[in-house]
Structure formats: C-alpha cells, structure tokens
Amino acid sequence: MSSELIQLLTRLREGDEEAAVELVRRYELAIRVAIRTNLSDPRLRRQFDSLDVCQSVFASFFKNAAAGAYDLQAPAQLLALLRKMAENKLRTRRRDQYRRRRDIRRLSGSAVEDADVTSREPSPGAMIEEEDLLRRALNLMPPEIRAIAHLRIAGQRWPEKIGRASCRERV
C-alpha cells in the first residue's frame, strides 16, 4: 500500500489542483506511450493526437476520482486503470471514426486525390466508338442472329420457349 498515492488521491478528492497537476506529471507520459502504441493506424493518427485521448482519460479519471469511485492502493493499480481507460477511449474514437458517415478508411491522402471526379457516364467520344463497334459487329452477323440482337438491344427478353437447348442447337 502506497501512502503517498493515497495522500495524493485524498488531496485530489478534496479539490486540490496541485494534486491533479502532480498526478498528470507522473502518469501522462506512460499514458501517451500506451496510446501511441495502440494508435498504429496512420489514418487515425491524422484524425487525433495521443494528447487528445490522454486529456480525455484524465478528465474522466478526475471526475470519477472526485466522486470516490476508485479504491486504489498502489501506483501500479492507478497506472493499469489509466491505461485501460486510454484503451477504451481509443477504441471508442476508432469506432466513431469508422462509422459509415465518417469512415476515415475512405481518406487515404488529400481530398483531391480521393475525390471521384470522373463521371460514371461514358464520354461522347466513347459513346460514338461503342455505337460504331456495335454497328460493325451487327453487320458481321447472319440476318436471323442480327434480328435477335436488335430485339435484345431494344430491351426485349428471351422468350421462355427458347431455352438453352435451342440456343445450343443454333451454335
């Protein structure tokens, strides 16, 4: 049992700001290292820093410690608690960033690189080339096959009575 830690937590519960500063000074580096270790995705690193998560951890800790929520007896217990809180905060932020509306996996570089500036519609030149290719292909077909192709191009479906067997017979 560490009486120094117990005194520090007691001072913290009493609202002593110096106790809070001392606690941050002692444990901030260890918490930030734990966060950076778990923050391996570079896309997430661009979204927030280890300091953001660390501040969030200490804010939650101070709020709960002031309410007497923790029964800590040793510095190792406090460190384990703060690290676990950091992991949970990081997991929450990761989940929030990967939600559909804000999915950072879509962002790989700059917004310009990732923007879909190409249209899904073919260009006028590509449409002319496709029409020319189709016209040449139709001209190479026998008249009965060309008639079937024109019906399909017009959107008509295969009649049910013409099955795979009759198609194989023609080939």
Image (cartoon, rainbow, N blue to C red):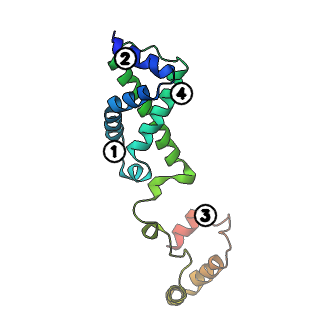
Query: Within 10 Å of the Cα at label 1, are there few (<14), some (14-19), or many (20+) other Cα atoms?
Result: few
Q: Gap between marks 1 and 2, in whole Å?
A: 32 Å
Quarter of the picture containing the N terminus is: top left
Q: Secondary structure at mark 3?
A: loop
User: Considering depth in this image, is 96 or 143 the residue closer to the camera?
Assistant: 96
Q: Which residue is mark 1?
A: 40
Pick whichever of labels 4 and 3 is earlier in the sequence.
4
Q: Which residue is mark 4?
A: 63
Residue depth check, mark 4 versus mark 1: number of the one nearer the observer: 4
For residue 144, side relative to residue 156 (left or right) = left
Is residue 43 in view? yes
- Number of numbered discs overlaid on the protein picture: 4
Q: What's the residue type where badge 3 is placed?
A: Gly
Q: What's the residue type where badge 2 is placed?
A: Leu
Q: What's the residue type where badge 4 is placed?
A: Lys
Q: Gap between marks 1 and 3, in whole Å?
A: 57 Å
Pick whichever of labels 1 and 2 is earlier in the sequence.
2
Q: Secondary structure at mark 2?
A: helix
Q: Which mark is residue 163?
A: 3
User: Considering depth in this image, is 142 or 27 the residue closer to the camera?
Assistant: 27
Residue depth check, mark 1 versus mark 2: number of the one nearer the observer: 2
Q: Do labels 1 and 2 touch, CB within 8 Å? A: no
Q: Gap between marks 4 and 3, in whole Å?
A: 74 Å
Q: Which residue is mark 2?
A: 5
Q: Do labels 1 and 3 touch, CB within 8 Å? A: no
